[in-house]
Amino acid sequence: MDKRIGEVILSFQNISLSFGGVKALTSIGFDVREHEIRAIIGPNGAGKSSMLNVINGVYHPQEGEIVFRGKTRRNMNTYESAKSGIARTFQNIALFKGMSVLDNIMTGRNLKMRSNFLLDAIYWGPAQREEIAHRKKVEEVIDFLEIQHIRKTPVGRLPYGLQKRVELGRALAAEPSILLLDEPMAGMNVEEKQDMCRFILDVNDQLGTTIVLIEHDMGVVMDISDRVVVLDYGKKIADGTPDEVRANQDVIDAYLGVAH
């Protein structure tokens, strides 16, 4: 992939997370570089979703530290995570099914809105100008994802693949510097996967967004990722380029050998 990958912007050192007596993550360490596509893979129960939840502040690890853009932090809540430029999509679609595509994507602008309640109530002056500016940004996202034809359609009426694209649009509306994708291809057919791969690559290439994704489809991971970290039973067993990971015997034993 011919693109400029920058410095480390996010790193994890000795991250451990337990629920009661169950260890979800044990001494996990890896980093994410600016503009790269960083995949987290592993069998079911490997700790992938737990790691993603640590990144955006849903879970707080009992041990270890996170360094984000040079600042060390033990914990960060989801609001702080979003304010600092980290957006996320979910394994199970979390959209407002009765609302239109446009309105769903507009909700991704919430943290960007500054006008106060009274101005909003009378929709005057600054509030009106702000609304216009936010709608312009949302329309850009809609154009980018090629969903102009469904912009007024209630999300609940759309096929699954398009709903996943709308969820991606809502995350992009927040203009994140880091985008977390939790199994973006889950449940999709081959054509829908191809479309989603193309948009993920475009987001990374054209918008310059750093992407961290969890994905079960190994073909997809190996095709679009710059680096891959592999978890198994909450421990890191490999970390490197797709070719390095593909050839790693621990990965073959734990994951590829079982699935293939």
Image: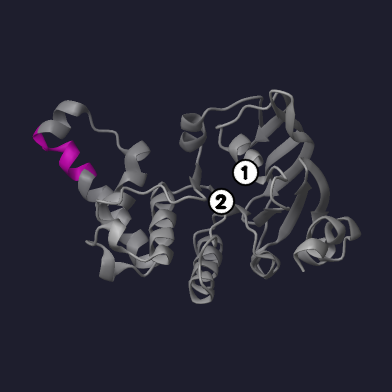
Local packing at callout 1 (Cα closer than 10 Å; few below 14, some 14-19, many 20+) is many
The dominant secondary structure in magenta is: helix
Residue 117: which numbered mark, if any? none
Q: Quarter holding the N terminus? A: bottom right
Of callouts 1 and 2, the N-terminal one: 1
Residue 42: image location, x then y, percent: 73, 53
| Camera-nearest residue between 253 and 151 | 253
Q: Residue at x 36, y 49 (%)?
A: 95
Residue 130: image location, x then y, percent: 23, 43
Tell me the quarter of the picture where residue 243 sits: bottom right
Residue 7: image location, x then y, percent: 70, 48
The amino acid pointed to by label 1 is Ser
Q: Residue at x 59, y 54 (%)?
A: 211
User: How many marks on residues?
Assistant: 2
Could you say whether the residue bearing mark 2 is in a helix, strand or loop?
Answer: strand
Start-end of magenta stretch = 122-130
Q: Is residue 183 visible?
A: yes
Q: Quarter holding the C terminus? A: bottom right
Does the segment drawn in magenta span residue 79? Answer: no
Residue 191: image location, x then y, percent: 50, 76
> Is the Cβ of the residue at disc 1 closer than 8 Å to that at disc 2?
yes
Which residue does the numbered mark 2 point to in the structure image? 182
| Camera-nearest residue between 188 and 110 | 188
Could you say whether the residue bearing mark 1 is in a helix, strand or loop?
Answer: helix
Along the horizontal axis of the image, is 170 left or right of 52? left
The amino acid pointed to by label 2 is Asp
Task: Report the Cα–Cα distance between label 1 and label 2.
Answer: 7 Å
Q: Is residue 241 visible?
A: no
Residue 49: which numbered mark, if any? 1
Does the segment drawn in magenta span residue 128? Answer: yes
